[in-house]
Amino acid sequence: MLETSPNGPVTLGFISIQCIVPIHLARGIFSSGATMNALIRRSSAIVSCKFHFFHTATSTAPLINDTGLYGYHHLKTAKGFQRFADDAIERSKELLNHIASMLSASEIIRTLDEISDTVCSVIDAAELCRYTHPDREFVEEASQASSRVNDFLHYLNSNHSIYKAVLKAEREGNSLTEEGKRAARFLRMDLENGGIHLSPERLDRVNQLNMEIVQLCRQFSTNIVTDPGQVDIFPASRVSKTWRHLVKPIYRFPRSTSKESMWSRDSLKEKGFRLVTSPNNLQHVLQCVSDAEVRKMAYIQGNSAPRANLEVLDKLIAARHEFAQILGYKSYSAFSLHSTMAASPEVVFSFLHEMSKSVRAKADMEFKAIEEFKRVKSCDLGGGLEPWDEGYFTWLMKSSAYNLNSLAVASYFPLARCIEGLKVLVESLFGVTFRQIPLAPGESWHPDVIKILLHHPNEGELGYLYLDLKSRKGKHPICAHFAIRGGRRISETEYQLPIVALICDFSGPSSTSVMLNQLEVETLFHEFGHALHSLLSRTEYQHFSGTRAVLDFAETPSTLFEHFALDYRVLRTFAKHYSTGDVIPKELVESMLGAKNMFAATELQRQIFYALVDQTLFGEQPSSVRDSISIVADLKRQHTSWKHVEGTHWHTRFNHLTNYGAGYYSYLYAKCFSATIWEKICQEDPLSPATGSVLRMKFLQHGGAKDATNILNDLVGNSITRPAGEGVIPDVTSLCNMLELTKC
């Protein structure tokens, strides 16, 4: 959400959260938080409660027979969220009472991980419910339960018996496994990131700020949904039949002042259409509508909402900055990055500025090519290139150069066939079956939801995946991976299996005829990469399960799986025409790939710009206050080839600023890392079991339980990273080769 994305670390003290949401504005890893924390680390929402139910590696029912929402027996009704929260808090207090008397480091760490697992079960179920459930009562009860448990988390963050126990476990940790030692170290660091070591007065202020940050992040996200913007288009003839499914009819009266004409106003009503400028609608209009005035109106309105988020963002920046300074950091960015691979804002800025300079010349060339194409196509010798022209004219150029038709491409990607593609991928790579199983009564939140069991012939059940992929009214318009429950070892013979949900917002003329465009196919595979990271990891502690890794590593598996969605050897296994059943032609796939890379420098420049906006807003604050609109406008002029449109503020719908605060650069790290992994490990034979074995054993199964740099170096070799300051930055060679950016 993740689109979580998405994912800057988020501090709730006891519970470490990193949210989600997209690359392309809607991907990510999901969860609830606002800063970076302790007992619960995550790049996504996660887990379940051992004290209610755990799941052995040989069991067949995901939780218990008497089910409610997500299999939790509490959640048969919306009011069940209250009892769910009460029981989690009660059980956590029981466990907490025994912490001081525990003798071994292993006991301490496992107990704290169980408390983390227990409270996560409520927060993660609540977050998924808030984003997807059609019943308002469920959403409201989930929000209240989440708030209640978050309040409890602040009590835990301030509990010195926990801190002393963690210090003891770290000090006497010789008996711990390497993962146990890492867990003790991270728990201590995360508690200190929540201010546990501060004076009571300063700790109280940190907790107040944390609560404020959580609420501001939630308000920012809510505003995006409730105020997507809209534009009224008159006359109706300006809206062609090809996109009328995106609009609703409206009517207006002509301006009339004469008494004689008043009687005829009803008969003179003029018909038009209202377009809600949600991200999906806006993308479609900017790419497909030839009427420049309509594109302009949609661009300006869509990038000027929600205006309320300007004030929300200002408050969030101030709260995060004060929070970081109380903890001894110059900025929220410095706080957020100190435990990542990059290690500091200076390393990130250096990386981003280096990439910006490298890509500028090629991006300027692409801009001039688009501008010249517009002049020729529009017979407009004096008109310049406007931001609302980019999507339309680049698509025309791609279509012309590669003879592409968006409807023809989508005809090979019915949603059901794309789900079949995910099945083929896991079976080929990992020898794992991908089997749809029935949902128990009360387990699902909508008829569109399907449930998948991943099963290995030798290892048994590996985990469960909910798929909720279609757009609908009231559902948050994101593509994201939500971890409902993280994996962890219960005993020598028992393993709590992970349960995750993959949420997307794919739409079509009707709910039964959803076909995906090329970008949506990539997005589906991206989120599935997150899901596999969660489902295939086998960590001792849920603290490190799957995507609960350092921020600038967590997007690497998901970005890697985008490459599978662009390889003909993979696509031919599932991409078949919706009516004829014909396999997608190789020539069409080559055209799709050529079109995708046609403006690679422009797209890379955009991602660099997004990362610089994120890093600057949450970086060191200037002595004189500047509004975020002017900061973003200046960065756009400095680091892109495109002008800023006065009055617009696209960043107020850029959810990554909350979910990935100071961490959006991690997508660029992931693009570099994944390009190297694809080139060195996958490209020769992307569907071979040998490829899958390497990816699973050296990469996916570790979750966040090993140092990320070591995982990457063990997988590919030391050439995948290079030192920079106190951190590391990715090698960019493979990415530049792939995008034909030879001077990158």
Image (cartoon, grey):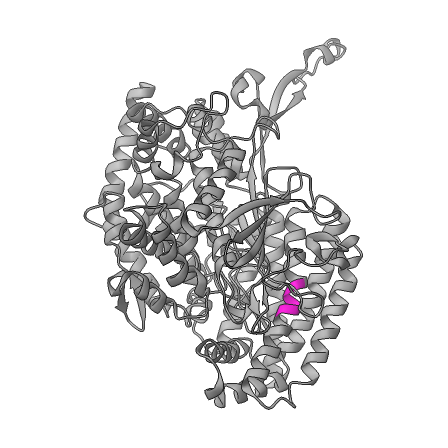
The answer to whether residue 478 shows anywhere in this view is: no
Give how far across and how far down residue 604 sits, in percent.
33, 46
Give how far across and how far down residue 244 sits, in percent.
57, 22
Report the side of 69 relative to 613 (left or right). right
The picture quadrant where one finds residue 711 is bottom left
The answer to whether residue 365 shows anywhere in this view is: yes
Q: Is residue 227 above or below residue 731?
A: above
The picture quadrant where one finds residue 46 is bottom right
Residue at image coords 60%, 80%: 203
Q: Which of the two residues, 330 or 517, is positioned nearer the viewer here?
A: 517
Q: Is residue 554 above or below residue 24?
A: below
Q: Which of the two residues, 116 or 308, is positioned nearer the viewer here?
A: 116
Give how far across and how far down residue 161 sits, in percent.
63, 86
Report the side of 421 relative to 369 (left or right). right
Q: Which of the two residues, 687 or 142, is positioned nearer the viewer here?
A: 687
Q: Is residue 105 above or below residue 309?
A: below
Report the side of 206 relative to 438 (left or right). left
Residue farthest front in this picture: 458
- From the image, give the main secondary structure of the stretch colored magenta: helix
Residue at image coords 74%, 8%: 260
In the image, residue 556 lies in the stretch drawn in magenta: no
Residue at image coords 63%, 80%: 158
In the image, residue 119 lies in the stretch drawn in magenta: yes
| Segment colored magenta | 117-121
Give how far across and how far down residue 663 sits, in percent.
44, 60
